RNA sequence: GCCCAGGUGGCGGAAUUGGUAGACGCAGCAGACUCAAAAUCUGCCGUUCGCAAGAUCGUGCUGGUUCGAUUCCAGUCCUGGGCACCA
């Protein structure tokens, strides 16, 4: 048992109602029970109060359970929810679980336990941990993405996406039936109505597939031949599989995608209407990556290439944002996956290109982009022709150009682009300088300010102007056009996995046929083995009886084969905020009347790690639902608050190499040591609990120690061993079981109480900031709550609060606190709010104030932060109802008016003294007063000041 | 590599709009109470110099703007998050 535990268990004397000591265990249990039994957190969809929706990011219930890092955002949202409730709002503050996912399946592969079973257990653990902290969730609204009642609607929403297309004139989603009607009556740019009607069913479906918002196409996956499976990026480490270390390569497979690119512009525009941090918006803008440029076609030579004789002349289409630099193009680079590569490579270069392609296949996209220092590439043997000066430009292939962006081909301008420059230098490609002295030959200069040289008809033009001139010329010649491009790609929406939503799709004659709505949910069938199916398909491909549609399943789909991949983690999390509003509805995903009432999420709290993934997907889904008239708004989250990460603070012990002796941190430099992680739960601050350490692992049972003062443990008697200090090293790193630096919130709630735990998490620092966890400081917060308790109760005398009239000084303390707590809570500055409570209680204790008139409003202020103690003391003051529905005290500014202020007086900006002056003095009077001051006179040394700066209510500065 | 964020005492942090740097808490030191301990209370607590009064330096680093910069600008170093199949 550690020292701190002894300290806090010493005060748990049994106490009756209105006990004399702060018995947090009894108090928290009592009120949690009552709140639960009386359904104090139930939220109605029907209320005359204004609504407020506070949402936490959906947790994935991992097997490790919650550690103290997870609840940070939940506590913040809980405080804000309770605060809004006290302010008279009907507050929706739900919680649920994003319970499909890779880790459960991985665990199943390793242990054979069904993911449904482990998920159920994990959720139970999470819920018990969350309840211990005292959150005000309405658990009747809980949702779980792996529950068929939930994923029925995920599948239904997928079908809405499948059955919709993005209309480019209306700029919104429309039912695909409208597109079909258009094709039948008017045709399209590519075919007439008659041609459309003559197309085969398959041809028609292929055309429609190119417009559906959820569509099937070919995409690249991480393929691991040895495991016979597709791997997540997470499962690939340094180009080999995490399991087994087998080689991984790219492989093209049929995949489902969401056409998020269609919404690129609206996702950008929508950012103007939401309250996210600027950096968050910036990350999303960069992810979408809108750029304006041009596509330009280059003729190739030899052409027709040797491989394609008799076919049409091949052209190389590149995308560039800098058409003004077209005379500086010294080579072309096409992506290794580019379709032209097989057609233009000359026989002499074939072997070299093949080798290079093989190399690239083994490289991840990240590696390809990240390693700017090592230049790789291969010449194809072909040349492009510059349309303006006829120059022959060698065509290379290199991994730094990706197939998915632009046209998968670039024109390289080494004098203006650093990567192109490094490439040219590495392969000895001559560099053309079109920007004169702006280019120094040492590195590229991406300027837009230069006057163009060596640039034919663009000579003498500033680059900024030349961009438009060049594009106009290109369009005039019919060799290219203006083009807006997005870095964002359509979102891959299938996984070759088991533990996810099955697609409500049957493939028949190579056509994807959606299931009928009445056949939803398509249940995830039970499997006994979680290994991959044949040909890289997911485990579902092994279930013959499920896979093939039989007559009794559906007469119309007989002979069809079900889609075997499942949906990704973000399917369920893209719309869960809607289901919380109407969680038990079995007619629709969420009744329109209900979503109209709750409307947008007013406050969404979560980490920046979701900046681009989850947030963009759910924003897209919301826009689609809005376009289809299923909800009434097209941005899901009105305001987003990003919580920081809590890092682990690891403790290190130092073992002397080759021995079982451990040396204290201060002495470790004198020995050759191996640093080892030690469980932070057996260290008090930095001081190791020697006995606990010996019990921690068998190999440490006989450990010996060299203590901080140099004493050796063998020379100590058992008694004196207790006084010896072994100091651990400290390392800040990720909070993880691996480093033994995780702390279970339940342990802290047991030891100090939920109220202390909640306030301490907030006290650690700004909710947006990342910071290391250190349990040590929690005692300060616990002392504060005990001190608060003692304003009401005395350990010996019992009740000491009174109904005496408050003094002006006491009212001033209270109202200063009301003002500050309200301001701080509104701006989510919960750490300073906790400080403010401490200051208030310190001041009231100094004033020996035990008056109900002051203490009662203070309890209401405290309720969002420490609900249990607030409720307990509230009842002790004689209140019948719960404090959860008290009304927030009003701040009275009249009580805080001051008539004078102590002004800091600086000389040349450095603080030298201070003077107390009436608050409403004017410049002239202040100058007179300041010049009378001795300290100012000393610094003036007889000379007149140059200037006296006086900022009312702030400061005074004398300039010499 | 690219995008985003952050660097303030021994530690977590405060300073809300450019105006008293270090609130509040932890740790530490000294003292009161106690047979003793716990609990509680009081005082001290950035650096250097000084008996003191006071001065000096000080918010990652180098510059700049300003009467005045933790706050604004330029550059730079370090740390954390993300980079499309972890969620």
Image (tube, coloured by chain):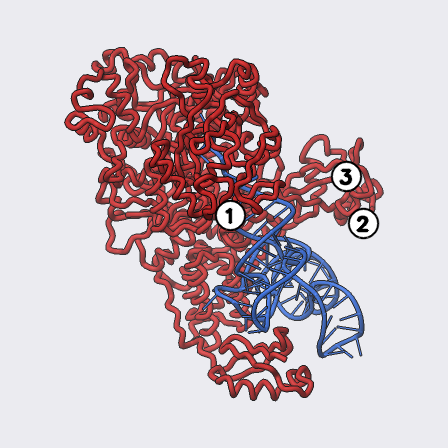
Chain colours: A red, B blue
**Mark 1 Cα shell of 10 Å, populated few (<14), some (14-19), many (≥20):** some
**Residue A450 tag number:** 1
What is the quadrant of the C terminus of chain A in the image? bottom right
Residue, far right: A715
Going from N to C along the chain, the mark reached first, 1 or 3, is 1
Using the rendered view, name the quadrant where residue B27 is placed: bottom right
Using the rendered view, name the quadrant where residue A414 is placed: top right
Chain at numbered mark 1: A
What is the quadrant of the N terminus of chain A in the image? top right
Q: Is residue A41 visible?
A: no
Q: Residue A63 versus residue A884: which sits nearer the camera?
A: A63
Q: CA distance from mark 2 to mark 1?
A: 68 Å
Going from N to C along the chain, the mark reached first, 2 or 1, is 1
Residue at 42% in and 31% down: A387
Residue ID for mark 3: A662
Q: Is residue A80 above or below residue A844?
A: above
Q: Is residue A339 visible?
A: yes
Q: Mark 1 falls on what kind of element?
A: loop
Q: CA distance from mark 3 to mark 2?
A: 13 Å
Residue A339 at x, y = what percent?
Answer: 43, 21
Chain at numbered mark 2: A
Q: Residue A794 versus residue A151: which sits nearer the camera?
A: A151
Q: Residue A454 versus residue A792: which sits nearer the camera?
A: A454
Residue A313 at x, y = what percent?
Answer: 38, 20
Going from N to C along the chain, the mark reached first, 3 or 2, is 3
Q: Is residue A163 above or below residue A525?
A: below
- The mark lying in front, picked from 2 and 1, is 1
Residue ID for mark 2: A709
Residue, far left: A185
Q: Is residue B74 above or below residue A129?
A: below
Q: Are marks 3 and 2 on the same chain?
A: yes
């Amino acid at each position: 048992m550690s020292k701190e535990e002894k300290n806090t268990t010493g005060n748990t004397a049994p106490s009756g109602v209105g006990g004399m000591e702060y018995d947090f265990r009894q108090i928290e249990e009592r009120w949690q029970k009552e709140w639960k039994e009386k359904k104090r957190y139930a939220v109605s969809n029907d209320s005359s109060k204004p609504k407020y929706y506070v949402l936490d990011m959906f947790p994935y219930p991992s097997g490790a359970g919650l550690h103290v890092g997870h609840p940070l955002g939940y506590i913040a949202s809980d405080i804000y929810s309770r605060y809004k409730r006290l302010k008279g709002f009907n507050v929706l503050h739900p919680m649920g679980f994003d319970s499909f996912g890779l880790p459960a399946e991985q665990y199943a592969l390793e242990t054979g336990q069904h993911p449904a079973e482990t998920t159920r257990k994990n959720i139970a653990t999470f819920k018990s941990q969350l309840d211990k902290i005292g959150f005000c969730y309405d658990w009747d609204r809980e949702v779980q993405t792996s529950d068929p009642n939930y994923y029925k609607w995920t599948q239904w929403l997928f079908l809405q996406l499948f059955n919709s297309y993005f209309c480019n004139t209306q700029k919104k989603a429309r039912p695909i039936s409208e597109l079909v009607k258009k094709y039948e009556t008017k045709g399209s740019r590519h075919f007439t109505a008659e041609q459309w009607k003559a197309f085969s069913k398959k041809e028609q479906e292929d055309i429609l597939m190119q417009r559906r918002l959820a569509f099937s196409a070919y995409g690249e996956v991480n393929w691991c031949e040895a495991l016979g499976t597709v791997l997540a990026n997470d499962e690939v480490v340094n180009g080999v599989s995490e399991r087994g270390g087998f080689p991984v390569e790219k492989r093209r497979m049929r995949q489902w995608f969401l056409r998020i690119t269609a919404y690129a512009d609206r996702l950008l525009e929508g950012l103007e209407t939401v309250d996210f941090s600027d950096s968050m918006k910036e990350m999303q803008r960069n992810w979408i990556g809108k750029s304006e440029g041009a596509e330009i076609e280059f003729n190739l030579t030899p052409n027709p290439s040797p491989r394609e004789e008799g076919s049409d002349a091949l052209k190389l289409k590149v995308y560039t944002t800098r058409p003004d630099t077209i005379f500086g193009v010294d080579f072309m680079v096409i992506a290794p996956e580019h379709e032209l590569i097989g057609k233009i490579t000359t026989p002499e270069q074939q072997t070299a290109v093949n080798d290079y392609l093989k190399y690239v296949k083994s490289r991840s996209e990240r590696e390809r982009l990240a390693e700017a220092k090592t230049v790789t590439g291969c010449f194809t043997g072909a040349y492009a022709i510059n349309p303006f000066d006829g120059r022959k430009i060698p065509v290379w292939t290199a991994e730094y150009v990706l197939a998915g962006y632009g046209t998968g081909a670039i024109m390289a301008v080494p004098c203006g682009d650093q990567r192109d420059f490094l490439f040219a230098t590495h392969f000895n490609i001559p560099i053309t300088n079109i920007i004169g002295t702006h280019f120094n030959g040492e590195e590229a200069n991406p300027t837009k300010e230069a006057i163009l040289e060596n640039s034919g008809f663009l000579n003498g033009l500033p680059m900024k102007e030349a961009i438009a001139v060049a594009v106009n010329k290109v369009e005039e010649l019919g060799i290219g056009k203006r083009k807006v491009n997005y870095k964002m790609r359509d979102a891959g929406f299938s996984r070759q996995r088991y533990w996810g939503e099955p697609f409500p799709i049957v493939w028949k004659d190579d056509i994807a046929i959606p299931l009928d709505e009445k056949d939803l949910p398509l249940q995830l069938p039970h499997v006994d083995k979680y290994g991959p199916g044949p040909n890289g398909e997911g485990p579902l491909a092994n279930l013959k009886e499920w896979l093939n549609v039989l007559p009794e399943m559906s007469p119309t789909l007989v002979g069809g084969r079900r889609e075997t991949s499942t949906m990704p983690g973000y399917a369920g999390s893209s719309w869960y905020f809607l289901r919380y509003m109407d969680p038990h509805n079995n007619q629709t995903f969420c009744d329109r009347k209900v979503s109209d009432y709750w409307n947008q999420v007013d406050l969404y709290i979560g980490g920046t790690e979701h900046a681009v993934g989850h947030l963009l997907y759910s924003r897209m889904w919301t826009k689609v639902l809005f376009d289809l008239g299923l909800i009434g708004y097209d941005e899901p989250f009105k305001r987003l608050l990003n919580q920081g990460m809590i890092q682990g603070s690891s403790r290190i012990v130092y073992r002397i190499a080759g021995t079982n002796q451990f040396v204290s941190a201060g002495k470790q430099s004198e020995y050759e040591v191996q640093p080892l992680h030690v469980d932070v739960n057996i260290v008090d601050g930095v001081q190791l609990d020697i006995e606990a350490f010996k019990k921690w692992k068998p190999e440490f049972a006989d450990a010996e120690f060299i203590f901080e003062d140099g004493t050796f443990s063998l020379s100590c008697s058992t008694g004196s061993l207790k006084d010896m200090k072994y100091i651990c090293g400290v390392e800040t790193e990720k909070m993880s079981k691996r480093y033994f630096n995780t702390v279970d919130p339940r342990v802290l709630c047991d030891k100090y109480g939920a109220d202390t735990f909640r306030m301490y998490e907030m006290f650690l620092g700004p909710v947006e900031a990342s910071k290391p966890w250190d349990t040590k400081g929690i005692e300060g917060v616990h002392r504060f709550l005990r001190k608060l308790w003692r304003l009401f109760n005395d350990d010996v005398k019992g009740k000491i609060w009174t109904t005496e009239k408050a003094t002006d000084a006491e009212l001033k303390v209270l109202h200063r606190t009301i003002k500050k707590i309200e301001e701080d809570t509104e701006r989510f500055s919960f750490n300073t709010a906790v400080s403010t409570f401490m200051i208030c209680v310190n001041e009231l204790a100094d004033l020996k104030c035990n008056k109900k008139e002051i203490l009662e409003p203070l309890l209401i202020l405290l309720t969002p932060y420490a609900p249990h103690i607030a409720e307990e003391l509230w009842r002790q003051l004689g209140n019948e109802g719960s404090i959860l529905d008290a009304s927030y005290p009003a701040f009275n500014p009249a009580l805080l008016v001051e008539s004078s202020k102590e002004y800091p007086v600086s000389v040349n900006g450095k603080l030298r003294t201070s003077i107390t002056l009436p608050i409403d003095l004017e410049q002239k009077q202040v100058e007179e007063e300041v010049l009378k001051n001795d300290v100012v006179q000393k610094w003036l040394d007889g000379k007149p000041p140059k200037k006296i700066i006086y900022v009312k209510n702030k400061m005074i500065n004398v300039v010499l």
